[in-house]
Image: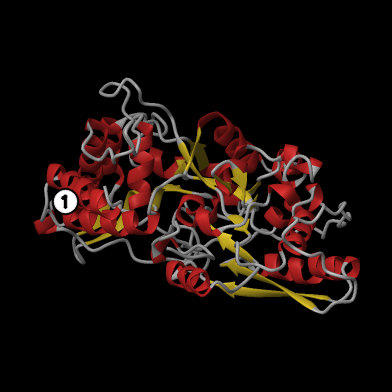
Amino acid sequence: MRTKFFALFVIVAVLLSACGKAAPTAAPAAEVVATEAAAPAATEAPVAAGDPVTLKIYLLDYTPDTITWLEETINPAFVTEHPGVTVEITQGSWSGWDTTFAGFFTAGAGPDIINLGSEMNTLYGESLADMDPYLGEAAWADIANFGPALENAKYDGKLRGLPIFTAPRYVFCRTDLMEAAGWTTGTPANFAEWIDFAKMASKIDTATNSLVQQALVPVDAGSMADWQWWLLVFNSLGGELYKADGTPNFDSAEALAATQFLLDMRQATYGPAADAVAALPAGQGSVIDVNAETGKDNGAVCLAHSGWAAPAFDNAIWEKVSIDAFAGDPANFPNSKPVVLAFNDWLAVPEYSQNKELAAEWLKMAFSKDANNQWNATMGLIPARNDSQFGYVTESSQLKREAELASQYGVGFAGIEEAAKLSTIMQDALGKLITEELTPAEVVEKIQADYVVALGQ
């Protein structure tokens, strides 16, 4: 979605929590095919032709190309089919999303369609409308074309909206910089190799006591302790966030190993906390790219992130970039598996909306086969619809590789209880990890205890 909570250093055109990538040139707008209207729910009167209605849509951190396409192609086509209806798109940010959404739901009023992230089906599910009467199999045959990302748009087994894309976290590595550092065996395949690689490929300018080359930038370049990076590592060990009884599983061997790995990688890159060097300076574009102004590398050898943070697909640097899953630590954890942690941003319809049928009709138009392809073409991401993965997806060797890895190794970032609280709890504890205020064992103990309280268990 996407982290949300991304580090500013990685500068993608979005966020979080985000970091920067030039959006690919948008493909020609696809023809929007009208879809058959679903029967209105019994509790909602259909909108009569000509009745003045404003359908409000709230989107978060999309590229200008995306918004332009929606406003110049999708919305006019929708208004033509629905006389008297006005579509209003408001753009927000992943920064402060929880406060914004809480305001909507507390007031019981707000946009008819809101942009949510992967983990938010659990967080807001009870406040979202059951859209099965409009978007389920009986109402819309196209729903069968959506892939695994559809699960992120459900709560209690019912559709609450539709997924836009899947954006897994891959490991992108500059093969030329790896070889220059003396590393010739490809992307590291276990924890020990990653630690050795971090020591070998990270470079420090002794004159300024700062990093000038960082072996691995894992979401957050500076701290190397982002909670979503932790989740990726944890998942690669076969870890499960919750035990069979529903209680948190941060007191597990996998959680301790993931936490220790983050500290080991931090120290292998920066040195012990007492002698820590300054972070890699911010550059322009992706951290694995070449700075267009200076002609020098931005400083990262490998990047663990989604395609948002990678170079634009038409960039010649891709001839020197490999794409892999994160491999885990099979020697010490037999359940380890290669993983790409998949984020799936989606659009949901709140229960308070008085325009659920209209919202569903807009979603069906914006998520037709051609439209879902075009929406994602503006961002260079993989469409949520399987039948929308054509054109720029199959023509791009990078996206083709990413789609194959996502299909084979994808693990969903969803179903997290009280995700906003968990992220705060984890970031606080992981911050104390890298300063060595807490040991790895104390960190997981703190997260476990605080999360149990947050869940009211």
Q: For residue 201, which quarter of the picture?
A: top left
Give the side of residue 335 with respect to residue 133, left or right: left
Q: Camera-side residue: 61 or 46?
A: 46
- Left of 119 or right of it: where is 280? left
Q: What residue does disc 1 label?
A: 271
Q: Residue at x 61, y 65 (%)?
A: 62
- The local crowd at label 1, few if under 14, some if 14 to 19, many if 20 or more residues have their Cα within 10 Å, is some
Nearer to me, 219 or 248: 248
Asked where in the image residue 374 lies, by quadrant, the reply is bottom right
Residue at 54% x, 55% y is 308
Which element carries disc 1, helix, strand or loop? loop
Q: Position of residue 179 (x, y in %)?
A: 40, 38
Residue type at tag 1: Gly
Left-right relation of 11 to 444: right
The total number of labels drawn is 1
Colour treatment of the image: secondary structure
